[in-house]
Amino acid sequence: MIEELIERVVHYAQDVIDGRITACKKHRQACGRFIQDIERSQVDGYPFEFDVDELYRFYRWSRMFKHTKGILAGQAIELTDFQLFLIGNIFCWKRKESGLRRFRKAYIQLARKNAKSQLLALISSYECFISPEQSEVYIAGWGREQSSIVYNEILSQIHAAELLKGKFSDSYGRIRHTKSGSIIQPLSKEARKTGDGKNPSLAVIDEYHVHETSEIYDVLISGMVARANPLIVIITTAGFNLDVPCFTEYQYVSSILEPDSPIENDEYFVMICELDKDDDIKDEQNWIKANPIVATYEEGMDFLRGELQAALDVPEKMRNFLTKNMNLWVDQKDNGYMPMSEWRACAVTEKIDLDVRECYIGVDLSKKIDLTSIGGVIPLGDGRFYVWSHSFIPEDTLAIKRKTDKVPYDLWAKQGWLTVTPGAVVDYRFIHTHIKKLEQDNLWTIKEVCYDPYNATHFAQEMESDGYTMVEIRQGVRTLSEPTKFLRELVLSRKLIHDDNPVLTWSVGNAVVRQDHNENIMLDKDKSTDRIDPIAALINAMVRAMLDEDTTSVYEDRGIILL
């Protein structure tokens, strides 16, 4: 049996490397690292060896428990080859000199529903009940509810195990192994203040992508100093906030796997299962890359098909599909308007031929003390649209807005994306003058100026008296839903072109949407915590510009995202 288990682990790794099992680049790199280490372990002087007996012990331990959820509920747990590979790496690599574990850290990133909680529960109970020392095992989510998910899975498993009856107690929010005194306890973010007295032998950081800071991680790591054989396991799906510590960790561990990277860490095990950069999310053969368990049985595939269809039908759900089901880091807020990777892919730096074109200009006057923006939409006649933006800010408020908004307004002004107007408020005559200069300096003509009527009566009258066709854009979901969706469809189908304006890009990233019961959407200025004036101006222009083109080709491409 022992020989069969190690053969399963080695064959699994080799099948991934050789392409017999579809896997992403980082998964293949992890398997390549394992095979290379197996070969090195046969050479004198290599400090690590693979303990096959430990693999057998864990396998026997896992067989004591039953599935608690899903189609296998009630059946004995039989580790998949993928799970066996993870366990073999984390627990079985030992230091030849001391017999202690090689890996002190493990980072595992999987899509949801791939039995993460089940595996963490097995790891936690194994450490608590089998360890020769008095162990302290802590399950650390950012909130107590998240921490309790794995803890409750542990309880369900051990309460149903006949051989463990009478060998543990469960009280006061912790599990205690009677014989050794080892404990398992869930923590939450309060541990960052109260966790200094803890001495973890095993720390599980669950769904690290929702942790706003690394404080819990830091407290648990510092408490492990006195342990001879400590282990911290980070397990997570990808997220949508690239400013959290998990994304920094993801970048670091990715470099550990990269063969050409100068970064090496023999004490850190890494497994990342995600779609590769250019994979089509609609190609079902790619799904196993992020779902090494879910995508191996028909019910799992049906689940993923349903999630994809929901995301294609309602684009607001696409962010969750990409992060939770395809395990991709997506730079987009909750209810965020735009996948920022898709927006950035539409940027061009070369000059676009705009001769003899007509431009629709949108205006968002906002408050005179804040950012005020105009945006242009130019139909190119082939289903594509070129867009541009320019903003204005009062000189007297520039310094304070730079601090409160935490963006380089002064740099953007030097680069020409932003005009600083004298005084404490934006004088709308500067906008009028800027629009006139645009028409003089370009070979395209201004067909219409589309404006939000709020506080814009005098501005509109002045523009109209100067010969411009002014179109009032009512700010409601009935008017703005279609152009808001249409602009996003252009981006997703790569039929929108922009000049990589950092002010506009910043505002697109800030924008969130609200949706009514009929799935109409519009930008939500109340919930968009940072400025969205440039993208709001652009959508005002798109209300009219989208009528200039046949939109059929755009909507035929709806939802097709190549990553």
Image (cartoon, rainbow, N blue to C red):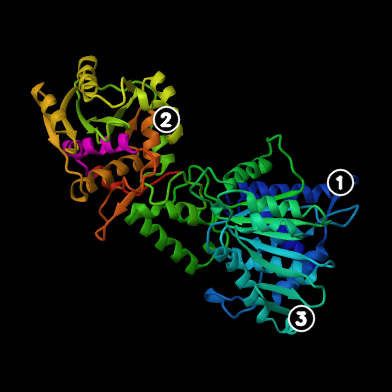
Residue at which label 2 appears: 400
Q: Which residues are drawn in magenta?
A: 532-552
**Crowd class of label 3 (few under 14; some 14 to 19; many from 20; radius 10 Å):** few
Above or below, comparing residue 171 to residue 382 in the picture: below
| Percent x, y of residue 401 | 40, 31
Tell me which residue sits at (73%, 60%) in the image: 202
The answer to whether residue 80 shows anywhere in this view is no
Task: Please name which of the two marks, 1 or 3, marks the residue nearer to the observer.
Answer: 3
Residue at which label 1 appears: 46
Disc 3 residue type (three-letter)? Lys
Task: Please name which of the two marks, 2 or 3, marks the residue nearer to the observer.
Answer: 2
Disc 2 residue type (three-letter)? Ile
The answer to whether residue 453 shows anywhere in this view is yes
Tell me which residue sits at (75%, 62%) in the image: 7
Main SS of the magenta segment? helix
Residue 382 magenta: no
| Percent x, y of residue 198 | 74, 60
Residue 539 magenta: yes
Q: Foreground residue, 492 or 29?
A: 492
Above or below, comparing residue 318 to residue 129 in the picture: above
Helix, strand or loop for disc 2: helix
Query: Residue 534: which quarter of the image?
Result: top left
Disc 1 residue type (three-letter)? Tyr
Q: Earlier in the sequence, mark 2 or mark 3?
A: 3
Q: Foreground residue, 294 or 372?
A: 372
Tag of residue 167: 3
Q: Foreground residue, 142 or 307?
A: 142
Task: Please name which of the two marks, 1 or 2, marks the residue nearer to the observer.
Answer: 2
Q: CA distance from mark 1 to mark 2?
A: 59 Å
Q: Earlier in the sequence, mark 1 or mark 3?
A: 1
